[in-house]
Amino acid sequence: MKIEDVKIAVLRIEGTNCEQESLDAFKRLGANPEFVHLKQLLNIDCNKDEKREISQFHCLMIPGGFSAGDYIRAGAIFAARIKSKLNKDLVEFVKQEYPILGICNGFQVLIELGLLPGIDNIISSSPDACLNINDSNRFECRPTLLKHENNGKCIFTSKILKNEIRLIPSAHAEGKLLFPLDKQKKYIKNLEENDQIVFRYVNPDGNYEGYPWNPNGSISNIAGICNRIGNVFGLMPHPERSYYKHQHPDWTITKLNSNLGDGKAIFESVLDYICKRF
Amino acid sequence: MMYEAKVKIGLKKGVSDPEGANTLKALHLLGFDTVKEAKTNRTVDLLIEAKNKDVVKKKVEEMCQRLLTNPVIHTYEIKIVEK
């Protein structure tokens, strides 16, 4: 498939606020992204020509923000609305190995939907994990260093070398990844064995460290995970905010040899996958 | 019949409660040093029309599982009164 034919739905409801830069990231690379309000998929309050089906797209993207005001729990209402009608379509989409990306609030939605961690099933009926309030009880907004730990399963990071460290900004109040407390070790072990851990927070030396390098207290320093197939990926930090090098906080010191930001590779990787696979 | 269901949502034992911890710290700063623990909960009051209390209970349980709580971190208690 040619890159210009790759159709991406950037999903939104009230309160999503990172849709523009997410759409731009795909557009700059030559793909064909479109803002899709969830009502267009649910066929509520929309004209005939606005109606959309998940199957019309090659990739779904849930951007960051504060969907539905983060009421109940971050992402819970967005997830409940998706689940109300689109569960089957979503499972079919994942089964056919089309990619789904969730960034920040989008990651919270994927966890609440039960699409992530996706260890045993494509989708679970109730969440298997939680993105809880940061240990600091604050909104943490600053650059974070992510070590790429995936061995090749995650289709969103194929263009990033293993153990490479990328600077990608975080901005969230609820990003502490947790699994059922009595089974945390088992979950982590399963994720490691299945190659589902994609990014971990590290310090500038590349070592695991607590706060502030791990901004939220996430278990095992995890910043991003993919499902068992590798085509559903969620992460708390915002790669769409470091698409260009001049978006990095230190770019004036390090000099701008190329304007290549650390987050760009994620969008390139998924587009490369879609073009080759479909 | 109308019923009011009060759903109290708390955190499971062992789950950190940064909001509670911060509240405790602020209370101590204000001089309330006899406070030994502060836990935060959320309550949701639902007005429900149903045949009887059992039906309400079953429905609210389902609501807790499907939206109001995340079983990984939350506990819940339901109290139902006739309105």
Image (cartoon, coloured by chain):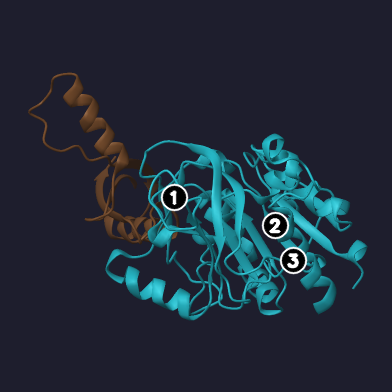
- Is disc 1 in contact with disc 3, using a CB cutoff of under 8 Å? no
- The vertical placement of B3 against A219, above or below, is above
Q: Quadrant of the N terminus of chain A?
A: bottom right
Q: Is residue A109 left or right of residue A43?
A: left
For the residue pair B2 and A235, the one nearer the viewer reads as: A235
Real-space Cα separation, disc 1 to disc 3, in angstroms:
26 Å
Q: Quick one: which residue is furthest to the top in this view?
A: B30
Are there few (<14), some (14-19), or many (20+) residues within 10 Å of tag 2?
many
In-front residue for pair A209/A174: A209
Q: Position of residue A108 (x, y in %)?
A: 52, 54
User: The chain shown in cyan is which?
Assistant: A
Check disc 1 and report the residue beneath it.
A214
Give whichever of discs 1 and 2 has the lower sequence position: 2
Amino acid on which disc 2 is placed: Met
Badge 1 density bin: few <14, some 14–19, many ≥20, Cα 10 Å: many
Rendered brown, the chain in question is: B
Q: Position of residue A84 (x, y in %)?
A: 58, 60
Residue B20 spot, x, y in % from top left? 26, 38
Residue A214 seen in the figure: yes
1 or 2: mark nearer the eye: 1
Please report, as a chain letter, where disc 3 is located.
A
Determine the secondary structure under disc 3. helix
Looking at the image, residue A93 sits to the left or right of residue A77; the answer is right
Residue A151's image quarter? bottom right
Subunit of label 2: A
Q: Tell me the residue that label 3 is attached to.
A: A270
Q: Secondary structure at mark 2?
A: strand
What amino acid type should be assigned to the residue bearing mark 3? Answer: Val
Residue A61 — which label? 2
The residue under the point 60% across, 42% down is: A65
